[in-house]
Every structure is written in C-alpha cells, then in structure tokens.
C-alpha cells in the first residue's frame, strides 16, 4: 500500500470512527456505560479531551487501514466492514478484558458488551475506508 492510500484511509476512517464513536458511546449507549461502571470513582472526565479522542480515532483507523492494505486484490465495502469489525472486536476485547482484570473501571456486563458494540463501530469505519479506497482506484492500479 502506498503512503497516499494509507494516509487517506487513516484520515477518512479516523473522522468516521470519531463521529460514529460519539453517536454510539456518548449518545445511544451513554446511560448503559454509566450504569455499568465499576467501583472506581472519579475516572471519567466531565468533558472529554477532544484532541486525545481524535488522535485515538486516527490510530484505530490506521490499524484498520493497515489490515486492509495487507490483503491481496480489491477490498469491497462489505469486506472492509468485515475487516474493520474484526479488528475492532479483537482490539477492544483485549483492552476491555485487560482493564477488567487489572482495575475496577467497568463491571463484567460492560466488559462483554463493549467489544460487541465494536463490531458495529469498527465495521462502519472499515466500510468507509474501503469506500474511499474504491474511489482512489484507477484503471490498472493495484487497489488494496
């Protein structure tokens, strides 16, 4: 994968993941997350640091873009959604269960549900990245 594709996929995916993450986790499931916090107190910020969340979204998108770029042939939007969903699930399954085992920031219900929601979150990001890859393809070029 060339640098242009990687950078474009990372930016488009990062914006998509930031926006969908806000909708899923801060709007649609905010009450669920609040109700299933662990016994630790004072760990949530009253207002998120937008720059840090945006940077995390870009890193997440870069990971999905990297996974797509190491595939042979063209990645369809459906295949991109699948790659994004699997990457998201595995990433957050790892993080959530590590934090569950090492801290008190979430209960077991939240620990199980969060990576499942990442199927949707990561899948949408992966679909957006694959869609932009499709637009970058030109006749005779090798699309990831």
Image (cartoon, helix red, strand yellow):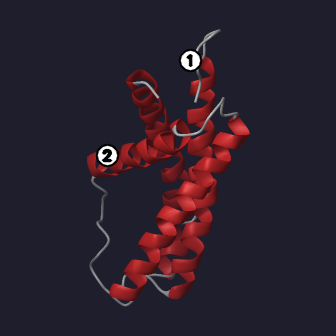
Q: Quadrant of residue 81?
A: top right
Task: Identify the residue at image location x=32%, y=71%.
Answer: 44
Residue 103 seen in this snapshot: no
Does dot 1 land on a helix, a strand or a loop?
helix
- How far is mark 2 from mark 1, CA to CA? 24 Å
Residue at the bottom extreme, as displayed: 39
Residue named by callout 2:
55
> Which mark is drawn over residue 100?
none
Q: Residues within 10 Å of mark 1 (few under 14, many from 20)?
A: few
Q: Position of residue 37 (x, y in %)?
A: 44, 82
Q: Position of residue 93 (x, y in %)?
A: 51, 71
State whether residue 3 appears in this view.
Answer: yes
| 22 over 38 or under it: above or below | above
Q: Residue at x 57, y 26 (%)?
A: 132
Q: Picture coordinates of residue 58 (x, y %)?
A: 38, 42
The outermost residue toward the front is 72
Answer with mark 2 or mark 1, whichever residue precedes in sequence: 2
Which of the two marks, 2 or 1, is nearer to us in this view? 1
Q: Residue at x 30, y 59 (%)?
A: 47
Disc 2 + disc 1, Cβ < 8 Å: no
| In the displayed structure image, the side of residue 100 where residue 30 appears, left or right | right
Image point 65% across, 30% down: which residue?
Answer: 73
Q: Tell me the quarter of the picture where residue 29 sits.
A: bottom right
Quadrant placement of the C terminus: top right
Count of residue discs: 2
Tag 2 secondary structure: helix
The crowd level at tag 2 (other Cα within 10 Å; few <14, some 14-19, many 20+) is few
Q: Is residue 120 above or below residue 93?
A: above
Q: Position of residue 122 (x, y in %)?
A: 56, 51
Give the labeled residue for mark 1.
Answer: 136
Name the foreground residue: 141 vs 124.
141
């Amino acid at each position: 994968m060339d640098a242009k594709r990687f950078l474009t996929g990372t930016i488009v995916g990062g914006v998509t993941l930031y926006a969908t993450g806000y909708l899923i986790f801060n709007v649609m499931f905010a009450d669920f997350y609040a109700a299933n916090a662990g016994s630790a107190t004072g760990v949530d910020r009253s207002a998120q640091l937008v720059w840090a969340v945006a940077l995390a979204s870009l890193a997440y998108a870069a990971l999905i873009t990297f996974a797509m770029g190491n595939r042979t042939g063209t990645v369809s939007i459906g295949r991109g959604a699948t790659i994004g969903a699997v990457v998201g699930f595995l990433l957050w399954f790892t993080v959530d269960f590590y934090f569950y085992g090492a801290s008190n920031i979430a209960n077991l219900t939240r620990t199980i549900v969060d990576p499942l929601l990442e199927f949707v979150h990561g899948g949408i990001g992966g679909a957006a990245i694959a869609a932009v890859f499709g637009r970058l393809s030109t006749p005779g070029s090798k699309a990831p």
